Amino acid sequence: MNMELDRRQLFQLAALSTTKVEERFQTIKGLLAGKDPVTWVFTGDSITHGALHTMGWRSYPEHFAERVRWELGRVRDIVINTGISGDRLPRLLQDAEWRVHRFQPQVVSLMMGMNDCIAGPTGRDVFRKALDTFLADLKAQKSLLLLHTPNPIYLPDMEKDSRKDLPAYVDILRQFASDNAVPLVDHYQHWMETRRNRYELVYLLNDAAVHPNQHGHVEFANYLFRKLGIFDPATSRTCRLFVP
């Protein structure tokens, strides 16, 4: 009986935790449900940039724009992508006035860490402090932060890979989101749960290593839509795009 009670308590705690995490999205969901136009800035590194590895197909910020501005009829919303290939968070901080704040966005979507993790363990504190600074600057500008973890990567020789510390940086993003009650779209966890082995993972990676292909960007978009409560494959062509 005690073991059964412990299981129930664990399930209740897990459900409560999930509810609290989902509540962080409510303010942004409210913006989508409202009538006022919203300016969205997506920023990050090459993954958000959507350069090269999408092979000319839409990136996840472009899928978001199609879903929101056309399919949801929010034609006066503005969606801006300022991701730069090869970027790291400290460099974004240096350029944040040009790439983020001058647009006076209501929501700033940030996916970063794929290049930051190359710094390894010695770069973890720098990454966390940069997150703290970025959030403080957004609050001063009255912008909301919508945080993302990057995708998992294929590491055939993990010990020699320059990005072997990526899981630690993903954990930093999770802890930062928890500490600051920031909405987090945890693509890393979602892909780890839905891609059962490395072969299923590489279906979503253009270079079979790091960068998502067009299908990976659809997967990003669909999971973001789910978190924002706007995933509807019954009526949306964007939500029905093929993912292998």
Image (spheres, rainbow, N blue to C red):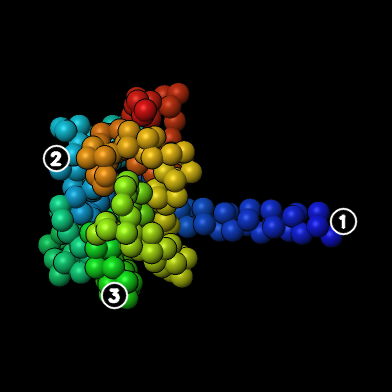
Q: Nearer the viewer, residue 72 or 163?
A: 163
- Reading the image, the residue beneath label 3 is 122
- Mark 3: secondary structure: helix
Q: Residue at image x 28%, y 63%?
A: 117
Hey, what amino acid is under mark 3? Thr
Label 2 and label 1: CA atoms lie apart by 58 Å
Question: Dot 2, how many residues are within 10 Å of its Cα: few (below 14), some (14-19), or many (20+)?
Answer: some
**Residue at disc 1, secondary structure:** loop
**Mark 2 and mark 3: Cα distance apart in space:** 30 Å
Earlier in the chain: of badge 2 and badge 1, it is 1
Which residue does the image show at 38% across and 40% down from the upper left?
Answer: 198
> Residue 243: x percent and y percent?
36, 29
- The residue at which mark 2 appears reads as 52
Q: Determine the image quadrant of residue 74.
A: top left
Check if mark 2's residue and mark 1's residue have beta carbons within 8 Å.
no
Label 2 vs 3, first from the N-terminus: 2
Q: Residue at left 48%, top 43%?
A: 193
Residue 163 in picture, x, y percent from top left: 28, 58
- Which mark's residue is nearer the viewer, 2 or 3? 3
Residue 221 to residue 171: above or below: above
Give the number of the disc on residue 1. 1
Along the polypeptide, which appears first: circle 1 or circle 3? Answer: 1
Q: Which amino acid does label 1 sit on?
A: Met
Marks 2 and 3 in Cβ contact (< 8 Å)? no
Q: Where is residue 143 in the image (x, y as percent from the top left)?
A: 30, 62
Q: In which quarter of the image is the N terminus?
A: bottom right
Q: Where is residue 128 in the image (x, y as percent from the top left)?
A: 33, 72
Hey, which residue is sitting farthest right in the picture? 1
